[in-house]
Amino acid sequence: MSGRGGTGGHEHVRVAVIGSGFGGLGAAVRLRREGITDFVVLERADSVGGTWRDNSYPGCACDVPSHLYSFSFAPNPDWPRTFSGQPHIRAYLEHVADTFGLRPHIRLNHEVRTARWDAERLHWELDTTGGALTADVVVSATGPLSDPKTPEVPGLAEFPGKVFHSARWDHDYDLRGKRVAVIGTGASAIQIVPAIAPDVERLTLFQRTPPWVMPRTDRAISSVERWLHRQLPFTRAARRGLLWGIRELQVSAFTKRPNQLGLIESLAKANMARSIKDPELLARLTPSYRIGCKRILLSSEYYPALARPNVDLVASGLKEVRGTTLVAADGTETEADAIVFGTGFHVTDMPIADRVVGAEGRTLADHWKDGMQALRGATAAGFPNWMTIIGPNTGLGNSSMILMIESQLNYMADYLRQLDLLGGRVALAARPSAVNRWNRHVQARMQRTVWNTGGCTSWYLDAQGRNTTVWPGTTGEFRKLTRTVDLGEYEVVRVRDGGGERIPAQAAAAAAPAPAKAPAKAPAQTAPKAAAEEGAA
């Protein structure tokens, strides 16, 4: 793969993809399937995998069943467990990169420092740690779980022990026999606590808000099941379809009828009571908000770990650090040798947005200062030929994000087809009215969801309290809404006399010359289609 020459001697490619997690690798596979080989995948780290590379903490695993948390076009009949651990998911992504011939396109250690739209040449100028390049289209697949968030705690800089975030685990530091403080009770923390509790001298968990936790019915997948999935692919497809269908049926309770979640709440309380016999501890662990308002966590080991004699729960957040003493907001003091932050990520304020400068000279972060919004979760007004995978309001509260990623890949593919049909040096710019209309519709639907009415404060909400993270519908509905690009929602930007001219997209499409013969599909490096691209949805 070689890009063509760009301005100033820089390499130019048709598409630049940022990130090599599920979104980035999925985009690369889809580009090759569309016959596009003039692209690069820019990865800031030294290997692929995204969040499944970065999060290697003890006990790290997925809370979505393996056969649903994988690409429909790259099924894995050999998942060893019903809920896969981090090493197996990372290995799966490496396998995808190899199987679909993506390695020549991947540029490791190429962190994007800035991306700036050139309105005269109608392309993006990207400055990376591995050099500069230009691209007609940029697909940002950095993901919302890529940049750890660590709170500013007075005195933390003077703490004499070890400090790290769960997503930057220090495997060279031995926790055995240490007094360890874990800050936060999210999805990472409830996996870390059971994994390290047997080895540490003392573990103190700082909890601002208790999570709702349901049992994780994880088990080994038998050799017979794996054989069936290899020999009879329809069994694998049926398993995936069943997992998908169950979750689609659950959506209405989250989005329209939160009161229906009361039964699930009762089951979660029963699960808690089976392991926690201390009434005081039970009271501290019982949430006061509706189940589902925060993501429901899955673990069969979390509550038993909290009942261990060497584990303490502080029902308060960390307020201050005085030497080796950690002081909670309620005044509780704890001695620690190490602090592990399980405090999540920059989700509603993604750092990549600070590095992207659009057509009006504004950064994406400035454009989103009052809340993230993007047309069909993909394109933002003022940023032509820029697409986001896992953009605003594409997150899920109960199912697999891979389903949403594949839907957005459908949209990306049709977006590129429309550019081909229009012909010449051209860009598509999302109409502000279309973006606003989409966002109003999403936010109106959000008002009755459990995420907005459940009585909690979650990472789904931005600084203004708006839910700019979750999709308030089914994955099937989202797939229908992103199957094709509606040109009525875009303007076409063309080069005219050295400058860009905006034309209504539908008018430009009508005036465009007949398209040339479609390019040949990518060479046979790509794996044969083992499953329908539409998947279960």
Image: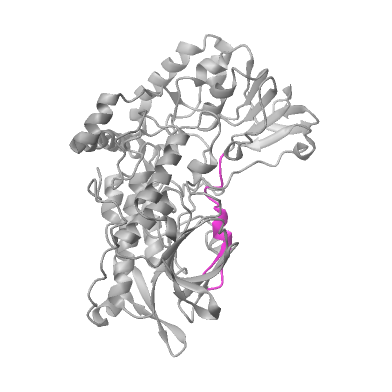
Q: Is residue 358 magenta?
A: yes
Q: Residue at x 51, y 15 (%)?
A: 304
Where residue 311 appears, as percent x and y from the top left, is 62, 17
Quadrant of the drawing holding the C terminus: top left
Q: Is residue 266 above or below residue 526?
A: above
Q: Is residue 339 magenta?
A: no
Question: Would you say residue 444 is visible in this rendering?
Answer: no
Q: Is residue 167 left or right of residue 93?
A: right
* Colouring chosen for the image of the structure: one colour
Question: Which secondary structure class fits the magenta region best?
Answer: loop
Where residue 314 appears, as percent x and y from the top left, is 64, 22
- Residues drawn in magenta: 344-362
Front residue of this view, candidates 455 and 115 = 115
Question: Would you say residue 107 is visible in this rendering?
Answer: yes
Q: Residue furthest bottom?
A: 497
Front residue of this view, candidates 87 and 30 = 87
Q: Quadrant of residue 66?
A: top left
Quadrant of the drawing holding the N terminus: bottom left
Q: Is residue 193 left or right of residue 229?
A: right
Where residue 369 appears, as percent x and y from the top left, is 56, 58
Q: Is residue 489 above or below residue 24?
A: below
Q: Residue at x 36, y 36 (%)?
A: 254
Q: Residue furthest top?
A: 277
Q: Residue at x 58, y 60 (%)?
A: 354
Where residue 396 appears, as percent x and y from the top left, is 39, 42
Q: Quadrant of residue 472?
A: top left
Q: Is residue 270 above or below residue 484?
A: above
